[in-house]
Image: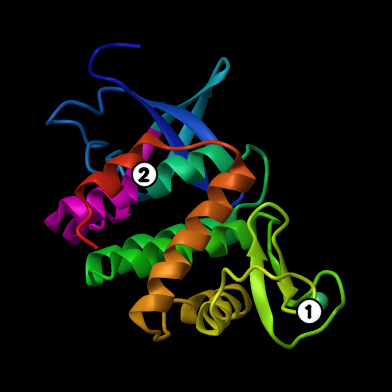
């Protein structure tokens, strides 16, 4: 690859994660420049060159420009993309995951409830990729009452008759049900107390990191600069 070229990692609805070369995309004069920016939602065309796809057309549909107003939103967007890059596979339908990514980036351009946006993304992403936690009933006795414990390892809940420890508020459980069960267009619309948001943030992050089994430098950076 030349110095002016870019190797792009692209999340597509039909083919999952793909890689492509964008010839000359670093140049200010390149017609691909805008469409090949980080975080861009772009309409692409490719040609196949040996084992590589080469970009022949790149028209940005949405660049999420307003996200760049704060370092918190940029660092969160970087974390979201790192996670997506880790969990997305090739040759797999990723329409729901892509829709979640786009909705989440759009939220970052609109408001600064970063803790909420992050928690919703984390939990819904896990749900979309097959790690939907089973939180409707106790994993031991099946009771739907007095749920008081969530296991980030098992993705299950326990009731107060089955465990003495308590680590989840009722409000947090309700927020998690909202995020998991609703159509994607509604998942960011809910209210909760600051205690619930604090706990939700910690549970959703721990659940994602535990299930994926690795950490992210971009997440560490977000925590360093975050004022929330
Ligand atoms: Zn129980």
Q: Badge 2 is on which residue?
A: 219
Whether pointer 2 and pointer 1 mark residues with C-beta atoms closer than 8 Å, the reply is no
In this rendered view, identify the residue nearer to me: 201 or 6: 201
- Position above or below: 162 against 76: below
Q: Quadrant of residue 61?
A: bottom left
In this rendered view, identify the residue nearer to me: 149 or 9: 149
Q: Badge 1 is on which residue?
A: 161
SS assignment at label 1: loop
Residue 48 position in % (x across, y down): 54, 25
- Looking at the image, is mark 2 or mark 1 earlier in the sequence? 1
In this rendered view, identify the residue nearer to me: 176 or 91: 176
Read off the magenta span.
56-78
Q: Which mark is residue 123?
A: none
Residue 184 position in % (x across, y down): 52, 74
Q: Residue at coordinates 36% horizontally, 39% vertically from top-left?
A: 57
In this rendered view, identify the residue nearer to me: 92 or 79: 79
| Disc number lying in front (2 or 1) | 1
């Amino acid at each position: 690859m030349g110095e002016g070229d870019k190797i792009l990692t692209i999340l597509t609805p039909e083919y999952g994660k793909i890689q492509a070369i964008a010839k000359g995309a670093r140049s200010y004069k390149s017609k691909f420049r805008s469409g090949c920016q980080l975080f861009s939602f772009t309409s692409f065309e490719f040609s196949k060159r040996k084992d590589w796809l080469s970009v022949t057309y790149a028209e940005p549909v949405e660049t999420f420009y307003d996200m760049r107003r704060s370092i918190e939103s940029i660092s969160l967007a970087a974390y979201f993309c790192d996670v997506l890059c880790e969990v997305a596979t090739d040759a797999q339908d990723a329409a729901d995951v892509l829709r979640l990514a786009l909705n989440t980036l759009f939220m970052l351009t609109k408001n600064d409830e970063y803790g909420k946006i992050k928690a919703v993304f984390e939990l819904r992403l896990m749900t979309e990729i097959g790690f939907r936690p089973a939180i409707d009933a106790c994993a031991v006795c099946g009771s739907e009452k007095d749920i008081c414990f969530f296991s980030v390892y098992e993705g299950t809940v326990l009731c107060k008759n089955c465990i003495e420890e308590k680590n989840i508020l009722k409000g947090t459980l309700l927020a998690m049900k909202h995020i998991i069960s609703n159509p994607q267009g509604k998942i960011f619309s809910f209210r909760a107390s600051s205690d619930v948001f604090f706990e939700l943030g910690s549970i959703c992050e721990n659940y994602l990191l535990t299930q994926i089994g690795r950490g992210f430098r971009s997440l560490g950076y977000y925590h360093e600069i975050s004022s929330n």
